Amino acid sequence: MKTITINDKEYPSKLRNIYDPPKKLYILGNYKILNDFSIGIVGTRRCTKYGSEITKSLSYNLAKYGVNIVSGMAIGIDTSAHIGTMLGNGKTITVLGSGFKHIYPKENINLFNKIIENDGAVVTEYEEDEYPMPENFPKRNRIISGLSDGIVVVEAAKRSGSLITADFALEQGKNVFAVPRKY
């Protein structure tokens, strides 16, 4: 595990100017990719098959062009984004809402390991023992947006963490794109 403080030269420059930048980051995997061009992809946990497939395709194709994908490793769209990126031999970054001893969701522990194995990065601002508390996830969304050069929202619900991420992106002056639910 690598620890980077806001005063270190390795600290991601993209995060220095966001609202409430994390004072410390804990990173497993390739910390050097945190300043590379990246697109965040976020969306619903209850995605449709269409939403999952379009997310995999989008992240796969962006990865083929050397774009890193940032997401939160939640079930649904986040998982599809990470998988699509790795299928495209790209690098993916996940931002956790917990410490490394409490990977959430537990169903994605294998995905967590594959991200690291595939030269990606897992980032958190939380100490190793921090549990995944509900209030941690809106806070972590500012980091997902902060590490991204733009955000794609796929099938988001009206009141969702995905829209919180989109709001952070707009506040940070980034482009936000949307893939609506297909009916």
Image: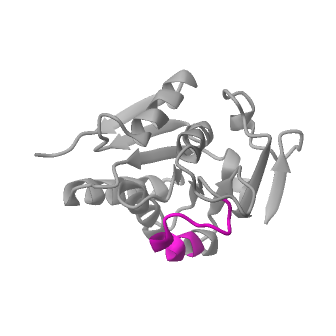
Q: In the depicted view, which residue is nearer to us: 109 or 102? A: 102
Residue at 54% across, 54% down:
66
Q: Residue 19: image x %, image y %?
A: 67, 26
Q: In the depicted view, which residue is nearer to us: 14 or 63? A: 14
Q: In the depicted view, which residue is nearer to us: 141 or 9? A: 141
Q: Quadrant of residue 8?
A: top right
Residue at 51% across, 53% down:
72
Residue at 34% across, 35% down:
159
Q: Quadrant of residue 18?
A: top right
Image quarter of the N terminus: bottom right
> Would you say residue 49 sits in the magenta stretch?
no
Residue at 81% across, 61% down:
2
76 left or right, relative to 1 = left
Q: Residue 106: image x %, image y %?
A: 50, 71
Q: Which residues are magenta?
A: 99-113
Q: Is residue 176 above or below residue 153?
A: above
What colouring method underlies this structural image?
A: one colour
Q: Is residue 114 above or below residue 164?
A: below
> Would you say residue 100 sits in the magenta stretch?
yes
Q: Residue 67: image x %, image y %?
A: 53, 51
Q: How many marks?
A: 0
162 left or right, relative to 71 = left
Q: Residue 143: image x %, image y %?
A: 62, 41
Q: Is residue 166 above or below residue 66?
A: above
94 left or right, relative to 17 = left
